[in-house]
Amino acid sequence: MKRISSILLAVAMICCSCNRTLEPDSTFVAGSGIQLKVAGQVIHTYDPLTWQLGYNPTAREFRASDDAMKDYFFVICSAVPSSKGQKLDATVTWSSGSSTQSVKGRFEVAKVEGDTYWLWCGDKKTQTGVTVRVLR
């Protein structure tokens, strides 16, 4: 009986630990610019001199791309970000060199400054942070 209890406790601990998400990356949240960060690596940073922003409120889609549209990232959300702590589902797609990659997951609004929102997905595999701006 004691052995069965120990096994059940171990299984419960494993199941619970698999569902945990990691806290937002401190350098991502401390940043002031619009960027995409995946697994600890900054993939793209918005530069207002050479990049453009787009926002479609109906589709809940945010876009950032360089002027040549070679490098970009876009985010499609299940809801428009509105407050810190809000959870939403999102798909983030970006170009990186000649390839296109995508991450889909549950994001949390980790920081809000005016119309700019820092979205964080702490999934252990992806750890994705993306900053979006609601353009009015």
Image (cartoon, rainbow, N blue to C red):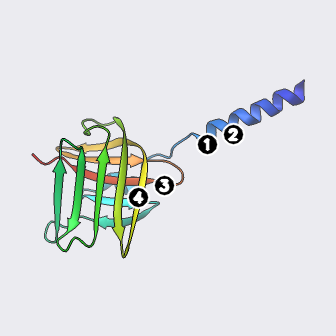
Which of marks 3 and 1 precedes in the sequence? 1
Q: Residue at x 30, y 48 (%)?
A: 76
Determine the residue located farthest toward the front in the rendered image: 59
Picture disc at residue 102: 4
- Lower sequence index among marks 2 and 4: 2
Of residue 121 and residue 95, the one placed in the foreground of this image is 95
Residue 19 picture quarter: top right
Quarter of the picture holding the N terminus: top right
Instruction: Using the image, tell me which numbered label, if any, was put on residue 14.
Output: 2
Which residue is located at x 86 percent, y 28 percent? Answer: 4
Task: Tell me the crowding category of disc 4: few under 14, some 14 to 19, or many 20 or more residues within 10 angstroms, Cα based.
Answer: few
Q: Name the image quarter holding residue 38.
A: bottom left
Res. 25 in view:
no
Q: State which tag comes first along the sequence, 4 or 1.
A: 1
Q: Pointer 1 and pointer 2: residues touching (CB < 8 Å)? A: yes
The span from disc 1 to disc 3 (Cα, nearest Å) is 14 Å
State the residue position of label 1: 18
Place of residue 40 in the rendered image (x, y in percent of width and height, measured from the top left):
45, 61
Residue type (three-letter) at the residue carrying disc 4:
Ser
> Is the C-beta separation of discs 2 and 4 under 8 Å?
no
**Amino acid type, residue under disc 2 in the picture:** Ile
Q: Are discs 2 and 3 less than 8 Å apart at CB?
A: no
- Classify mark 2: residues with Cα within 10 Å, few (<14), some (14-19) or many (20+): few
For badge 3, the amino acid type reads Thr
Identify the secondary structure beneath mark 3: loop
Residue topped by disc 3: 126
Where is the C terminus found, in terms of image quarters? top left
Instruction: Find residue 55 and report its horizontal and vertical position in percent.
Output: 17, 50
Residue 12 image point, x, y percent: 70, 32
Cα distance in 3D space between marks 1 and 2: 6 Å
The kind of secondary structure element at disc 1 is helix
